[in-house]
Amino acid sequence: MSMEIAMPQTGQLPKVKGPEMNDRDFINDILSMEKYLTNGYNVGLAEMQNPKLHQDVQQLLIETHNHQWGAFNLMFQKGWYKMKAADSAEVSTTHQQFNNYKSQFPTFN
């Protein structure tokens, strides 16, 4: 049995969704954009040689992560973002799976 982690939904959302955007749609769009931006900044930072530019983009990345978390938190607080709670067996299995990956990497001393 899977459990959801969610807050009670606040505000009324239509039972049947029309083509118009509501508050949840707008915030979800912002959250998606922030996720997209953080991915792009991460790739750019990994390949950036200029130290000053790296520092500036790194600051943008931090700010974008904060905006992303704000949008996520707002959606969660309004009950518009639900997550599946993992049970202890699932956590243990996943931990073991990733722990086994360590053998695939060289040891750095």
Image (cartoon, rainbow, N blue to C red):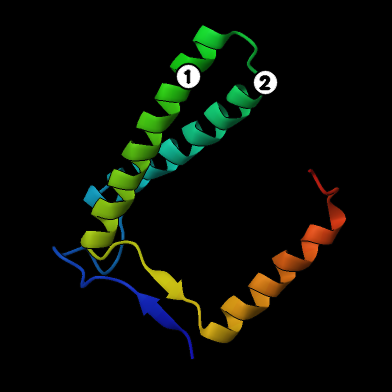
Q: Position of residue 65 (x, y in %)?
A: 40, 38
Q: 55 above or below 42? A: above
17 left or right of 8 in image: right
Residue type pointed to by label 2? Glu
Q: Tell me if residue 19 can be seen.
A: no
Q: 32 above or below 87? A: above
Question: What residue lies at 41% left-to-right and 37% top-to-bottom?
Answer: 34
Looking at the rendered image, the quarter that the C terminus falls into is top right
25 left or right of 108 in image: left
Residue at the disc numbered 2: 47
Tag count: 2
Under circle 1, the secondary element is: helix
- In this view, the residue in front, 61 or 28, is 61
| The quadrant where residue 13 appears | bottom left
- In this view, the residue in front, 22 or 77, is 77
Q: 84 above or below 1? A: above
Give the CA separation, mark 1 to mark 2: 12 Å
| Local crowd size for mark 2, using a 10 Å CA cut-off: few (<14), some (14–19), many (≥20) | few
- In this view, the residue in front, 35 or 50, is 50
Residue type pointed to by label 1? Val
Question: What residue lies at 37% left-to-right and 68% top-to-bottom?
Answer: 82
Under circle 2, the secondary element is: loop
Residue at the disc numbered 1: 57
Q: Position of residue 106 (x, y in %)?
A: 86, 48
Q: Which one is earlier in the sequence, the residue at label 1 or at label 2?
A: 2
Question: What residue lies at 78% left-to-right and 67% top-to-bottom?
Answer: 100
Question: What residue lies at 51% left-to-right and 83% top-to-bottom?
Answer: 87
87 left or right of 71 in image: right
Do labels 1 and 2 touch, CB within 8 Å?
Answer: no
